[in-house]
Amino acid sequence: MRKWGRGVGLVLIFLCVALRTPGQGGATGAITGAVQDKSGREVTGAKVTALNESTKEVLRTEVTDSSGLFTMTLLPAGTYTIQVTGGLTHELRSNVYVQADYVHSTGKDAVLSRNVNVQQVAGRFVTIDPRFGGFTQFENRGYIDYDALQTRAEYRGSKLRLGSSYTLAKTFSNTLATGVGGGAATNPLDLSIDEGPANEDRRHNFVFDGSYLLPLDFQVAAIWRYSSPLPFSVTSSTVVFARPEPRGSRRGDNYKSLNLRASKIFKLGGRMTATGFWEAFNVMNTDNFTSYQGSLQSSQFGQPQVEFPRRQQQVGFKLDF
């Protein structure tokens, strides 16, 4: 057996995915799998969760046994993302903690669409039935893989809390969009052309956060975030059923933001309290862009099309009882 505390590389192996329809109620299924490290040894004590992609609910959480196995039964029929998490937390000294976690998430059976009215003859793409421009068929052949090493150092005092986090992540996929409609395959006969960094693939993520409890139940807090650029892909109207460059081969700009919060707690007696607060987002009014133009025929090629919100402020009041 290999327990958490040494090694972070994991391999998730699906042994069985079964589906059955009971006498009453809807169809249900079961997922059985094994978690191994990269050397092939079983990992015990790893946390495995099943996320239903339609409802975005975590429907089952299991822990691998001494053989690295897990089983999830009576799952409603649907598409699931399986996530495996494990790591360690260590107290270096009084009130100072460090943490490291490895996360692996696999989304299977994502929806994508193909034009099934095309075939390849002698290296050329030919329409099967010329009466129709195309037949769109939706299939559960997409996948999304996410791997991340999450680290954090934190000081937890009676009034002061400071933390620093870094996540090294990789998101890889063969589908261009999520949701019911999915994304259209670039080449309906070769789905591997669309394999590459997913649209949400931010490799480096830094977060610094802290809060301080002042006299009279005032509290101030801040969080600063930096994320490396998202990928975007190059397209061309003159290239059919192929890509001018591999998917996600270009990157936009990084993301930076500083958020602040100040609050005051009012004790109303018993367990009842009220909190008034002020919050400011993107305090430095930083320009953060996304959705870059990838068409080679566009005069705006390589330019951002969307900007994240600039500085925003809000005030609020919360009652707890």
Image (cartoon, grey):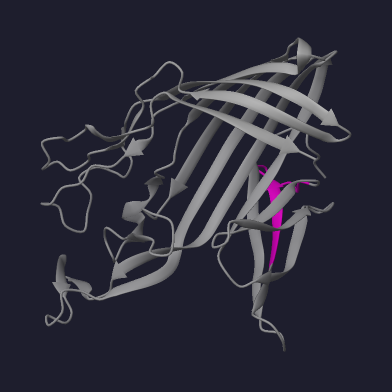
Q: Looking at this view, name the residue that lies furthest to the right.
A: 270
Magenta includes 147? no
Question: Residue 120 at x, y = what percent?
Answer: 20, 70
Question: Residue 192 at x, y = what percent?
Answer: 36, 56
Q: Looking at this view, name the residue that lies furthest to the front.
A: 268
135 to 42, vertically: above or below: below
Residue closest to the eye, 170 or 318: 318
178 to 181, vertically: above or below: above
Question: Which residue lies at the image location 78% right of the left edge and 52% below the top edge?
Answer: 64
Q: Quadrant of residue 95?
A: top right
* Whether residue 94 is visible: yes
Question: Residue 181 at x, y = what percent?
Answer: 38, 64
Question: Which residue lies at the image location 48% right of the left edge and 42% below the top edge?
Answer: 171
Q: With 164 as the anchor, is 158 left or right in this view?
A: right
Question: Residue 219 at x, y = what percent?
Answer: 69, 17
Residue closest to the eye, 305 or 205: 305
Q: Quadrant of residue 214?
A: top right
Residue closest to the eye, 138 or 172: 138
* Whether residue 122 is visible: no
233 to 284, vertically: above or below: below
Span colored in magenta: 31-43
